[in-house]
Amino acid sequence: MMKPSTPENEQTRLNSLKSLGILDTPRSERFDCITRMASRLFQTPIAIVSLVDENRQWFKSCIGLDTQETHRDISFCGHAILQDSVFVIPDTFKDNRFFNNPLVLSDPFIRFYAGCPLTMSDGSKIGTLCIIDHKPRTFEAADITLLEDLASIVQREFVSMQAENSATQFKSTMNAAFDAIIVMDKNHRVVSFNAAAEATFGYKHQDIVGQDLLGLIIPTRHRAAFKQSFEPYINTSQGPLIGQRTEIEARHQDGHEFPIEVAITKEKFLVGDSSSVTFVGFIRDISERKLAAAQIIQASKLATLGEMATSVAHELNQPLSAIRMAAANSRRKISKGTFDFQYLSNKLTRIEDQATRAASIIDHMRMFGREAKETPEPVDPRNVVKNSLDLMGSQLRLAGIEVVTNFSTNCSYVLGHIIQMEQVILNLLTNAKDAMLEQDGKSTITLNVFEDDVGVHLTIEDTGGGIPDAISQRIFEPFFTTKKIGQGTGLGLSVSYGIVHDMHGTIVAENIAEGTRFTITLPSFVPQHQLNIK
């Protein structure tokens, strides 16, 4: 007896076999109907779907044989998987490899064998569809073709099982995920919708599958932009939404909108014996994260307001003093009977102007202190710097700090929140002031606003001695501060970094000759009507 050799790709073959998850599973009608058909067509008492494992051949379906497995060393199928076509033994008594095989000399008394290798997509031959007879027989070319056709049906069943296993595993993984996962085809139709997606968007899987996803979860005003970003990826595999996390607004089933973070990948899904291209969206509701970030920004703003109390008091004292003086002079003139209407009119106008100035300061402080919930809008960066200096100018002058401004005559707008941008500038001005209070010599802050091909730049330079190298890499970390306890929250630069980042900009710090330069770079914003003119 000759033992079957081991294929060169044995480990790959075994891996392919075990990936089916079919070994030692109950009999299945999907395979039994094929072995019954083979037995009837070839008029053989035995037909088997045999799978060759590491040390055994195991029968997934068997007609005419009671046993479910035999040792691989005595198997005929172990020889058959070494072939590229149907393996035929017309008469085992006349074949030196099998005449003394236990399966020939005893039950099931094999005299004839024909087995077609079952080949997986990776080329691995994992078993056979074989027929066995107790008497010798011939096997013509037409018989070989018919057995190959039946074997191809078995192979398609294996492919179908793989697809079912993959679908089950994928569904299990999807429903175990904390993030919403949505699978859609190239026409935006939903293919799969996991449990987290149901919780996030309010739709049930059975109600949304087959529907146009964009029409359901993307607000109307954003759909055109989303399609414009998504469509190029279908053919080119490139696009702004692919391979990176992007923040967009989404719509719940009940109509309310909320912020999400989404990343999209392109995948092939196996359906039957063919595959189709789908797009998998990984989505996270970031409403709570946005709320927490807004609360941190608000806390930082209130801390900044507290630090500016002295400056604000000084700013308000000037118009109040002017009002008090104008009122006192007017009353004195009236009491002496020496007034005239023009004099009183001038004094009342002065009182009105100073009251307006005081109200403007208070309104600005109130606006600065409120939470920024409005949508981004075009902002002139030069006005941001001017407004910030209006709030903090007196504080800087009281500290003996000279302020120099250089504004470009022509400068594009940027898209953002003016109050948040003022907060960034005020944080940087406060840090510059505190650094220079500890230094001897002239104290100067220089603010520049200009534009180039990269974008709009705002720079703030001070003469505060610079940032020590030991901490330069940590200055944007939350709660990191070099100030004494009670003199700073450690949030200013961290919040500023977050605000600039949300505006798709950058903020960097570098030491210069006498101090530090912070450079904020933001994308230029060109209004749509100007684009249309071009």
Image: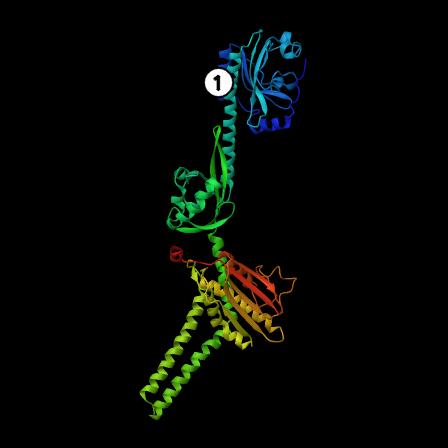
| Viewer-nearest residue: 212 or 253 | 212
The x and y percentages for residue 122 are: 57, 28
The residue beneath circle 1 is: 33
Give SS at disc 1: helix
| Residue 362 location, quadrant | bottom left
Identify the image quadrant of the C terminus. Answer: bottom left
Residue lying at the far front in this picture: please name it.
534
The image shows residue 251, relative to residue 160, as above or below, that is below
Identify the image quadrant of the N terminus. Answer: top right
User: Image check: 198 left or right of 428?
Assistant: left
Residue lying at the far left in this picture: please name it.
341
| Residue 372 location, quadrant | bottom left
The x and y percentages for residue 75 are: 63, 16
The x and y percentages for residue 432 are: 57, 69
| Viewer-nearest residue: 490 or 496 | 496
The answer to whether residue 251 is visible is no
Q: Name the residue type under label 1.
A: Cys
The image shows residue 321, relative to residue 159, as above or below, that is below
